[in-house]
Image (cartoon, grey):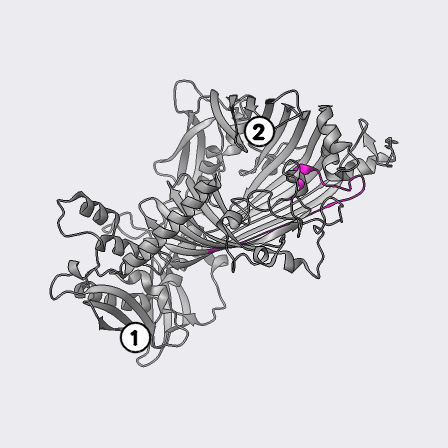
Amino acid sequence: MFRDNKRVVVHFLFAVVVVMLITACSASKFIPDNRYMLDKVVMKSDRPGFDAAQLAPYIRQKSNSRWFSLFKIPLGTYSLSGKDTTKWINRTLQRIGEQPVLFDSAQARLSCEDLRTAMQNMGYMNASVGFDVKKKRKRRLDAVYTLHPGDPFLIRHFSYDIQDSGVARVLRPFITKNFSPRQFTVADLDKERTRLTAILNDSGYYHFHKDFIQFSADSARGSHDVDVTLHLMKYRKTSNDTAVSHPRYRIGAVRFIAGDSTGLHLRRSVLANSSAISEGSYFSSSALKRTYNNFGRLGAVRYTNIDFAEHPDSNLLDCNIQIFNQKPNTISFQPEGTNTSGDFGAAASLTYQNRNIFRGSELFSLQLRAAFEAISKLDGYDAHDYEEYSVTGSLQFPRFVAPFLSDRLRYRSTATSEIAVSWDLQNRPEFHRRVFSSAWKYRWSDHKHDINYNLDLLDLNYVYMPWISPTFKHDYLDSVSNRNAILRYNYEDLFIMKVGFGLSYSNARNALRANIETAGNILRLLSKPLSFSRDAQGHYQLFNIAYAEYMKFDFDYTHHIPLAPETQLVLHTDFGIAWPYGNSSVLPFEKRYFAGGANSVRGWSVRELGPGTFRGHDGRIDFINQTGDMKLDLNAEMRSHLFWKFDGAAFIDAGNIWTLRAYADQPGGQFKFKNFYKQIALAYGLGLRLNFDYFILRFDMGMKAINPAYENNKEHYAIIHPDLGRDFTFHFAVGLPF
């Protein structure tokens, strides 16, 4: 396996060297006489503080694309071809490459006009653009655009001319009376026009649109102060009609209409609560949008069509909501292939779903799953197979399900409630495990602020170990010479009762996730009043099991920085900490942190790094020992589009895990503030991504740079003494790492 990885790396590095040489190849043979290739576009400004780069989209002619904003690999690939297109190799190289961009003076002239217009729209009314070319060797040139913005114009006074008295009354509370001078920009004027239009569209003005609002500006000669007036004109159905007051509409009847012959499948109360449009209220475009969104989230609804009918000679609108039903019942079968450390197996799941079980678009799901895997390289055990059977049932409501809630809060458009129960049976050669789980969860969103919330009101997990192999007990659990407290704890019966809360936020540039959960607190409060029994260590028990107690906090943040049209720098941090207390001296295995792998420090494989300076020594149980109570990941990745569906990446990863307590089986793993920074691992590497839009196949090649778990100086500073056999790790994954 290593030889194959090493071969891949060698070939990849060779390819990198080749393409670097390609970029140096001359493309002059494809440049006609008396023409020049556009080598680079330079933008600068003579006004301090003015960012010329922000106007780059207005440049009509760009130079050849660069990988990672540095290397013209596509141009170099094209340059390797010959002019004889009858040869397949030349056609292929030209098809996957990029032909030289020939400088076009007409495009440059139009770019100057677009740049000047863009600056005027930003308030630099006297702006101008200078253009020059800088010729270079091999018939290449740089196009240099020099921006002369001048001084910006400022709005001194902003006034409103509203010709419709009814509209004026509606807008009066929303008009700014105390105006402070600000820069004159077309974008701000359009924003004000959009704001007023939205207010009126939500206040009954069904036919109102932005074209009824215009602006006039007045400035004295030689002055940079502008007086702006917003004119809101009266209603005209056509340009030839007489101007009248804008009609204001109320909702008449609200009708729910079946979209097919099967009729309406939802209860009347569900239909009414899903509609934000109500009889007697003013027409509102926001209510219309909310109604579409509310019905769109109902699994029982395929799609919705809403139209309005005007009453003749009145300002009433009848609302017709047409509901098209989704098929209520579905059955699906999904086979899987599995591979665990080279052991192959198969799995299959059968899922039944009912999307409208109580006629309120409640989603009932029942899943049966079975898995089998033949386990090799496991000596001393009677069996060598892994079997797993599970059944999971869940019921999801498209609303809050809780007592003492008003209908308004209960039917909040973005809320869901879920009850889930599962039973899992696992038979391995080393042990048999039974897991029972149940959960009561809430999910809701705040679309205005792009925030999603999740509340795990109650989450129960009961782990029962009916049988453990005598061989496994002798070698790992009972052996005095190899006793491992962390390992023993995770092969005992376990009961977890947790509560959790989390939120997530995302926009074009940022993504944030935070989550906190705690376990055992409710049971601790009940332990003394209900006289819970204690075990030999003094731990309170429920069902003769010492229940787990811990608190856990996770924080994940990603920031995107655009560097070029198809290149961006992505920064990421992932921090987590968990503290076992009371009944627990060790975190349950599922709640412990690990480092390494395709989404962590990519110079190490999964669970190969940490905690601290700990170095694994027994591959059979290192999956337990190389876990911790605290995690820190720091990542920087430059992503760039290459060609066709291929994207490239160059990354630097840093991080590690630590324990909060000193465990005998994890020497060097405890977090200590004075030296934790010396234990941060560092890795670097390159990645290739196959981007199909709906999913991404990712190949990452990572190299260790600084290894905190070292035996010699060369191993510690691997970046100075690289060794492919020791430091290289290859990762294959689906989706981006962060």
Is 117 positioned to the left or the right of 328 in the image? left
Q: Nearer the viewer, mark 2 or mark 1?
A: 2
Q: Secondary structure at mark 2?
A: strand
The residue where tag 1 is placed is 126
The disc label shown at residue 434, or none: none
When the figure is inspected, residue 721 is found, relative to residue 661, above or below; the finding is: below
Residue that badge 2 annotates: 396
Q: Residue furthest left?
A: 33
Q: As rendered, which of 643 and 398 lies closer to the eye?
A: 643
Q: Earlier in the sequence, mark 2 or mark 1?
A: 1
Q: Is residue 250 left or right of residue 273?
A: left
Tell me where the magenta segment starts and ends, as one range: 570-593
**x and y percent of residue 631 in the render?**
63, 50
Residue beneath the point at 13% across and 49% down: 84
Residue count near mark 2 (Cα–Cα under 10 Å), binned few <14, some 14–19, many ≥20:
many
Q: What's the amino acid at mark 2? A: Gln
**Residue 715 seen:** yes
**Residue found 50% across the figure and 38% down from its top:** 276
Q: Position of residue 455 (x, y in %)?
A: 64, 39
Relative to 298, residue 129 above or below: below
**Looking at the image, residue 332 lies above or below residue 615:** above
Residue at the outermost bottom position: 222
The kind of secondary structure element at disc 1 is loop
Q: Amino acid at mark 1?
A: Asn
Quadrant hosting residue 257: top left
Mark 1 closeness class: few <14, some 14–19, many ≥20 residues within 10 Å? some
Could you say which quadrant of the image residue 718 lies in? bottom right
Question: Compared with residue 706, is residue 226 higher up or lower down, i.e. above or below?
Answer: below
